[in-house]
Image (spheres, rainbow, N blue to C red):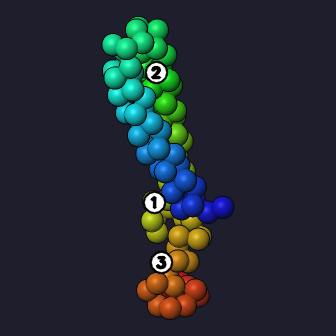
């Protein structure tokens, strides 16, 4: 799996976990009047768990993400060269 593919996967996980955080928090607010503090606390706890997961995957992504042509990642550089010239051969001069 290339660095770009890992980056896309990790960003997707972060976005999903952030959305899950919002949904769980809203559920805690909506369910609190009907079911009491225990249910609200349960959903807030899961929301915090999802937020911590998003932060952890974001930190991992920081170290995995490609930096374009400056990263030294052969796949990224080959894709850029192919897009520029239509060939995967690189010229060093």
What is the number of the mark on residue 86? none
Q: Residues within 10 Å of mark 2 (few under 14, many from 20)?
A: many
Q: Work out which quarter of the rendered image holds the N terminus and state it.
A: bottom right
Q: Name the residue beneath numbered marker 1.
A: 67
Q: Nearer the viewer, mark 3 or mark 2?
A: 2
Q: Residue at x 47, y 50 (%)?
A: 11
For this rendering, which residue is in front, 61 or 51? Answer: 51
Contact, CB < 8 Å: mark 3 with mark 2?
A: no
Where residue 32 appears, as percent x and y from the top left, is 37, 15
Contact, CB < 8 Å: mark 1 with mark 3?
A: no
Between the C-alphas of marks 3 and 2, the distance is 45 Å
Judged from the image, the secondary structure of the residue bearing numbered disc 1 is loop
Q: Name the residue beneath numbered marker 2.
A: 43
Judged from the image, the secondary structure of the residue bearing numbered disc 3 is helix
Q: Name the residue beneath numbered marker 3.
A: 80
Q: Residue at x 55, y 77 (%)?
A: 78
For this rendering, which residue is in front, 4 or 63? Answer: 4
Q: Residues within 10 Å of mark 3 (few under 14, many from 20)?
A: some
């Amino acid at each position: 799996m290339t660095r770009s593919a890992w980056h896309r996967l990790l960003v997707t996980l972060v976005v999903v976990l952030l959305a899950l955080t919002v949904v769980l928090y809203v559920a805690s607010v909506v369910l609190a009047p009907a079911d009491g503090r225990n249910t609200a606390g349960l959903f807030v706890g899961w929301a915090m768990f999802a937020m911590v997961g998003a932060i952890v995957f974001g930190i991992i992504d920081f170290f995995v993400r490609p930096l374009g042509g400056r990263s030294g990642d052969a796949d990224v550089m080959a894709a850029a060269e192919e897009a520029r010239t239509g060939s995967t051969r690189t010229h060093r001069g």
